[in-house]
Image (spheres, rainbow, N blue to C red):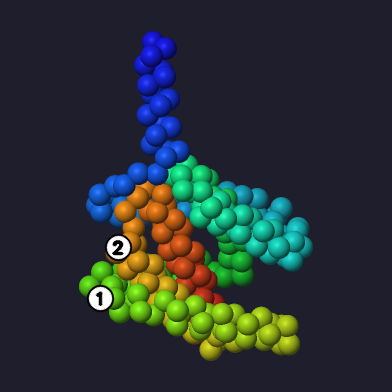
Amino acid sequence: MENSQAGLSHYLSGLFLKDRSVSKRVFNLVIGLVLIWGFTTNYLTVVYFPTEWISSINPWVILIGFLVFSTLGFLIMFRYEAPLYSFLGYNILTLSVGLLLNLALQEFSYSEILTAIQYTATITLLMIITATLMPDLFLHFGKVLAVVTGWILVMELSWLVIFGHSHDAIHWIVAACMCGYIGYFWAAACKYGDTLDQAIDFGGMLYMEIINLFLRILELISKK
């Protein structure tokens, strides 16, 4: 009995605490499961977490908390090359995003949210298909996307400070950048990813780009 328990413990330790290579089919499956897990966590957080409690907290406190915990989640994901730690970091990230969504989605109607989800899912699928067919095209855009995203975020922050709100043109540019990032990370995952830990990491990066795309589309839909 003790030998079997020790064997099970050793197996689980090897499975989750040590990174290992997986087939491309398993790799893509893990990315899909990671995304499903993240979106399910967000759904449960938005639907079942007390909205009144979130609303009673200063929005700046929530924003700072989101930045702190999402950064912590990313650091854990990429600092340790172990599937268990990467998944732990990913859960910290998705929970912090879920709490932020709980607050942000209160301003939008159900139909607007549903439409944004449909657009986001369709665009994401199209970008994945395109990146699968033309991976090199997206991989060449990596540095360009980073520069454009950096500048547009500086512009948006300046606009928010000066005018108190963002601009539709900024939402369009950021949404386009997120589309590019979805294609880029998928192409990079297909070309360079081959371990369980990397599948979780790439899933986490895709998750954040999809969430950002969803929020930008939602903003644009609500202003029609």
> Upstream in the sequence, badge 1 or badge 2?
1
Would residue 62 appear left or right of 12 to someone viewing this image? right
Q: Is residue 41 visible?
A: no
Above or below for 176 versus 105? below
Classify residue 153 as left or right of residue 38: right
Dot 1: element: loop
Left or right: where 60 falls relative to 208:
right
The amino acid sitting under disc 2 is Cys
Which of 69/121 is in front? 69
Q: Position of residue 12 (x, y in %)?
A: 40, 31
The amino acid beneath tag 1 is Met
Instruction: Determine whether, in the image, residue 189 is placed left or right of residue 115.
Output: left
Please name the residue shown 54% across and 69% down the image: 109
Q: Which residue is mark 1?
A: 134
In-front residue for pair 80/210: 80
Indicate whether 157 appears above or below 99: below
In percent of width and height, residue 152 lies at 57, 84
Mark 1 crowd level (few <14, some 14–19, many ≥20, 10 Å Cα): few
Q: Residue at x 51, y 48 (%)?
A: 80
Provide residue 44's location: percent of width, then percent of height: 52, 50
Q: In which quadrant of the rendered image does the N terminus lie?
A: top left
Query: Where does residue 72 sit, x and y in percent of width and height?
Result: 61, 54
Q: Are marks 1 and 2 in contact (CB under 8 Å)?
A: no
Q: How many marks?
A: 2
**Disc 2 designates what residue?**
190
